[in-house]
């Protein structure tokens, strides 16, 4: 292990640095033809200068008005240019790495098989990236007079024709097979994202005429995508503050919009939007308005998004949060969840299907058929019909109005659930359990209502052939018509009965 100090007036030439060797080149010192081998370190700062340095497996650091000229970086070698440092006429060969950090500057760099990264507030001028070379310019990094030859890669985009950028990064005719990124002021035109590729557009980046074939594209936080085509197995995701305009999703392709905004979208039959696989071509001038779709996996709708004529099959899970849906059918093994701000209408839950209306969600005109189940867990429902074998449970602050319970249907109200205006018809049953509240209900011929311990029913009408049992619960203002029956058993309390 050796330390070399090249100070004012000292000229070093032909030194080889090996494992744990160090060279410090400072103000007025000059190092020429230095070889930095694996484990060696060369530091140039405070007005020091290094010329014709070769970095092979070791590290070279240039900062604070240090200057490096005609440096060659080979495999496993690293050249880092920090604040105030400059590097001129650098060659980065296969496996080598050059990093220009904030305040650092690189001029006339040639990347041939190696990698160059320009970080925020770093600058790179007159860079040439040859086939097999790789350059990355982050948001805030500055690149001018950049040439990327065919087969070279910039920000993860492998260009297929020679590119020249006077200022910034303006990629054209490239493909993405790994990770690619566009940030502030950066653009890409005519890009193809292949299987295994991942393209990220953010912070003011813009992508135009992108084709996604098996890979993924993500647009968020003021990134923008225009004229994107998503083919089979491709995925386009538009997240918060991202925008997508003039998008086409073909059969087998998928698009997800969560917090972003979209315009002029076409989803062809067999394509997916937010997990909804459309069965006919859909065109959306503004926003997301799905029609005639099926759900076999996870699907969702957010604020201002809509869906009509949807079928949820076995294994499908549909979540409505801030959006609205109409004419949905939930089959056996399917599930629909309506959460805060979600609004659904004209839903049918068939045998083995399930529907949950959470706090802040609402459902109107729902039909729960044989073997179907609906749970109102803090949400609100209106005009529900429960038929043979269907079940509806209202609890945890949930509410139901204008419900009809038909033959074989069952409705249960408990744990601070509340129900108003229910009609229990022939063969239907209603259970009011602990802390459940029922008001203004009717029990018609063949129907039955049971108020168990802790439950309460107010203003109930029992018609001819109807039956009401109070077993530990309490009822008020009940009217029992001719042929109707009320039974009060152990612990039941009744008041104001007619």
Image (tube, rainbow, N blue to C red):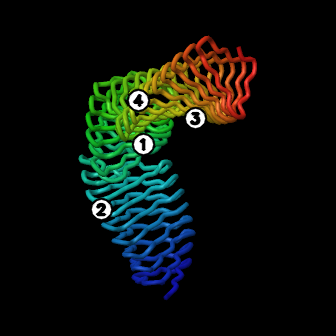
The residue carrying mark 4 is 370
The residues bearing labels 3 and 2 have C-alpha atoms spaced at a distance of 62 Å
Q: Nearer the viewer, mark 2 or mark 4?
A: 4
Residue reaching furthest to the right: 495
To which residue does mark 3 refer? 377
The Cα–Cα distance between marks 4 and 1, rounded to whole angstroms, is 48 Å
Q: Residue furthest bottom?
A: 1
- The residue singled out by tag 2 in the image is 112
Name the quadrant of the C terminus. Answer: top right
Between the residue at mark 4 and the residue at mark 3, the CA separation in whole angstroms equals 21 Å
Q: Mark 1 highlights which residue?
A: 201
x then y, percent, for residue 126: 37, 53
Tell me which numbered mark, 4 or 3, is placed earlier along the sequence: 4
Does the CB distance between marks 4 and 1 fall below 8 Å?
no
User: Mark 4 Cα within 10 Å, few/some/many (few <14, many 20+)?
Assistant: some
Who comes first in sequence, dot 4 or dot 1? 1
Q: Do the CB atoms of the residues marked 2 and 1 lie less than 8 Å apart?
A: no
**Dot 2 and dot 4 residues touching (CB under 8 Å):** no
- The mark closer to the camera, 3 or 2, is 3
Is residue 114 shown left or right of residue 373?
left
Which one is in front, 399 or 87?
A: 399
Residue 191 percent across, percent down from the top left:
30, 42
Snapshot quadrant of residue 403: top right
Nearer the observer, 485 or 224: 485
Earlier along the polypeptide chain: callout 2 or callout 4? 2
Query: Circle 3: is it few (<14), some (14-19), or many (20+) Cα within 10 Å?
Result: many
Residue at figure coordinates x 56%, y 34% from the top left: 358
Disc 4 or disc 1, which is closer to the eye? Answer: 4
Mark 2 and mark 4: span between their CA atoms? 69 Å
């Amino acid at each position: 292990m050796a330390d070399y100090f090249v100070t004012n007036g000292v000229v070093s030439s032909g030194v080889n640095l090996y494992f744990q060797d160090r060279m410090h080149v400072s103000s007025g010192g000059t190092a020429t033809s230095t070889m930095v081998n694996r484990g060696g370190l060369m530091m140039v700062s405070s007005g020091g200068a290094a010329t014709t340095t070769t970095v092979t497996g070791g590290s070279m650091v240039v900062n604070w008005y240090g200057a490096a000229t005609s440096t060659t970086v080979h495999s496993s070698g690293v050249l880092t240019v920090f604040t105030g440092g400059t590097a001129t006429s650098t060659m980065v060969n296969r496996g080598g790495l050059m990093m220009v950090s904030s305040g650092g500057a690189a001029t006339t760099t040639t990347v041939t098989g190696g990698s160059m990264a320009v970080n925020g507030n770093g600058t790179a001028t007159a860079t040439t990236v040859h086939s097999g070379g790789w350059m990355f310019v982050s948001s805030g990094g500055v690149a001018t007079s950049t040439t990327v030859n065919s087969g070279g890669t910039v920000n993860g985009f492998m260009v297929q024709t020679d590119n020249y950028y006077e200022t910034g990064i303006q990629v054209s005719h490239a493909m993405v097979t790994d990770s690619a990124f566009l940030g502030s002021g950066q653009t890409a035109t005519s890009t193809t994202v292949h299987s295994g590729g991942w393209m990220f557009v953010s912070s003011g980046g813009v992508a135009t005429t992108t084709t996604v074939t098996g890979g993924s594209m993500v647009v968020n936080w003021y990134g923008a995508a225009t004229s994107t085509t998503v083919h089979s197995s491709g995925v386009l995701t538009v997240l918060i503050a991202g925008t997508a305009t003039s998008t086409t999703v073909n059969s087998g392709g998928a698009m997800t919009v969560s917090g972003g905004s979209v315009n002029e979208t076409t989803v062809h039959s067999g394509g997916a939007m937010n997990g909804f696989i459309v069965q006919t071509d859909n065109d959306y001038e503004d926003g997301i308005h799905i029609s005639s779709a099926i759900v076999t996996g996870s699907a969702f709708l957010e604020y201002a998004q809509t869906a009509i004529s949807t079928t949820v099959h076995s294994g499908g899970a549909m979540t409505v949060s801030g959006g609205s849906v109409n004419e949905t059918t939930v089959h056996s093994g399917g599930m629909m969840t309506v959460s805060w701000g979600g609004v659904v209408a004209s839903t049918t839950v068939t045998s083995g299907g399930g529907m949950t209306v959470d706090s802040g969600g609402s459902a109107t005109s729902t039909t729960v058929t044989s073997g179907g189940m609906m749970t109102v867990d803090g949400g609100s429902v209106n005009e529900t019909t429960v038929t043979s074998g269907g079940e509806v449970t209202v609890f945890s602050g949930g509410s139901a109005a204008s419900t009809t319970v038909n033959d074989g249907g069952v409705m249960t109200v408990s744990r601070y659930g509340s129900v108003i205006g229910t009609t229990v018809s022939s063969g239907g049953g209603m259970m009011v359990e602990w802390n459940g509240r029922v008001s203004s209900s009717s029990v018609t011929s063949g129907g039955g209502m049971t108020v168990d311990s802790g439950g309460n029913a107010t203003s109930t009408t029992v018609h001819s052939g109807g039956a009401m049992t109070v077993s530990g619960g309490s009822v008020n203002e009940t009217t029992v018509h001719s042929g109707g029956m009320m039974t009060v058993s152990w612990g039941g309390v009744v008041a104001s009965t007619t």
